[in-house]
Image (spheres, helix red, strand yellow):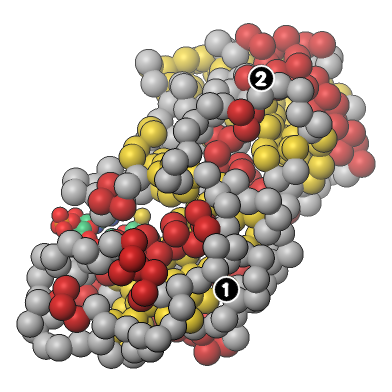
Amino acid sequence: MRLERQWLCQRPGLRPPSRHAHSRRHQRGRPLCLRLAAAGGFGQPPRRELGAAVTITLTEHPYPLPPAEQFELIGLWRSEWSRTDYDWLEALNGDYSETLETISVVARIDGRPVATATVSFAKHAPETCLIGNVVTLAAFRGHGLARGVTEAAVELGFRAGCTAAFLGSSQHEGNVYERCGFSRLAGSIMRRPAPGYVETGAEFETGQPAGIRPAVWGDMPGFVRFLTEPQATVVIDYEHGLIAMAHAEPLRCVSAFAVLHDDAARRNGAMLVLAAGNRVLGVGTVTPGPKGAGAHRAKIDFATHENYAPRLDELLARLLADAASREVSIIETLIAETDRSKLEVLSRAGFEPIATLPGHLRLRHGYTDVLQLERRL
Ligand SMILES: CC(C)(COP(=O)(O)OP(=O)(O)OC[C@H]1O[C@@H](n2cnc3c(N)ncnc32)[C@H](O)[C@@H]1OP(=O)(O)O)[C@@H](O)C(=O)NCCC(=O)NCCS
């Protein structure tokens, strides 16, 4: 029997979710079938047949999750990955939940979990959602399950008020996310605008009341959106391989925030954001080296949206103050030789070039030199 005839809801009398899914109390394990049917999520015929009549349900699981639900999800993820860029257990236990809403959608066949996708968005006034950890058990691929769970996850983000969804994906031919309405911006990053949303750049317009503060997990979606915007500098974070999209194909999407945040935390460093609410307009990191007999050194980097270039000096000053509070005595940074605006900001703050690394940075249009600059605190 064709699978499309078998998208049955186990509890067909359930109402579709409210328009403000994020603000109400989530009903754990609530079937999503009706909403998917209405959204046409499973409208396409599957490419293969399962060979028997089956019942497929989709359920949503808002974090923090009880152990049994954690176990199911980790089982699905571990069928493909032994780890990802953020800590599964921290997320599942709700360590990020104060500022970040995270919901996993699970597809089950005859009760057995077979596919999942996860959506994350800021807890308060979300604008951007991220889709991640999409996986279907190998034996169940090609039946539209990934498409179904991805559609459901995106829908949760849009219902919460997000104007765009982002995800990271390799450039796979016949990409399942293209079928879910995503288009590739560059490199690994794909975006899907919410229905009726027209990009005007209003989110990043000048003059917003933005302040500098330590990054929190609720900044993760806004940070990914920031990465896709025009930057005031070529390099966003040299140490962590983040280059402005205008100059290089991005290699990271959802994981970009976790890489910066966790590396800073692990090394007793800091990740700061220039933000208006959870709208990220700039970022800076202090990454200390090991404390030894010699001078305590740290690397810093920083970037803003091009509309917020005048705040680069202030961001740098905050990073220097943060480094000083960690008893760092020498600060170093690496910049693209072509990054003239960043060089000016660093020079104003007393940094001096100490070395040139020839052709060390590969940008979209070829290799460029890297300048190493240093300043004593
Ligand atoms: C990608 C994946 C989730 C698709 O699951 P699925 O349930 O088979 O997906 P669907 O049936 O809805 O869609 C199938 C399409 O996915 C496409 N696809 C396969 N691997 C893909 C990938 N890594 N990225 C994007 N699309 C992929 C296939 O080309 C297929 O298209 P086709 O129907 O033209 O052949 C599954 O192959 C998987 O779990 N892969 C390992 C984990 C992974 O790579 N996850 C994605 C991380 S971004």
- Look at label 2 and name its amino acid: Asn
Where 103 sits versus 127, above or below? below
Whether ligand 1 has any atom under 8 Å from the Cβ at mark 1 is answered as no
Q: Which mark is residue 62?
A: 1
Q: Name the residue rendered at 60%, 46% in the picture.
A: 127
- Pointer 2 local density, CA inside 10 Å: few below 14, some 14–19, many at least 20: some
User: What is the number of callouts on the image?
Assistant: 2
Task: Measure the C-alpha gap from mark 2 to mark 1.
Answer: 36 Å
Closest to the observer, 158 or 236? 158
- Residue lying at 73% horizontally and 9% vertically, measured from the top left: 344
Residue 317 in view here: yes
Q: Position of residue 279 (x, y in %)?
A: 67, 40
Write the residue at 26% across / 83% down.
Answer: 8
Query: Is 341 left, or right, of 10 in this rendering?
Result: right
Q: Quadrant of the C terminus?
A: top right
What residue sits right under mark 2 in the picture? 307
Give the residue type at disc 1. Answer: Pro
Q: How busy is the neighbourhood of tag 1: few (under 14 within 10 Å), some, or many (20 plus)? A: many
Location of ligand 1 given as a quarter of the image: bottom left
Q: Quadrant of the N terminus?
A: bottom left
Which image quarter: residue 188?
top left
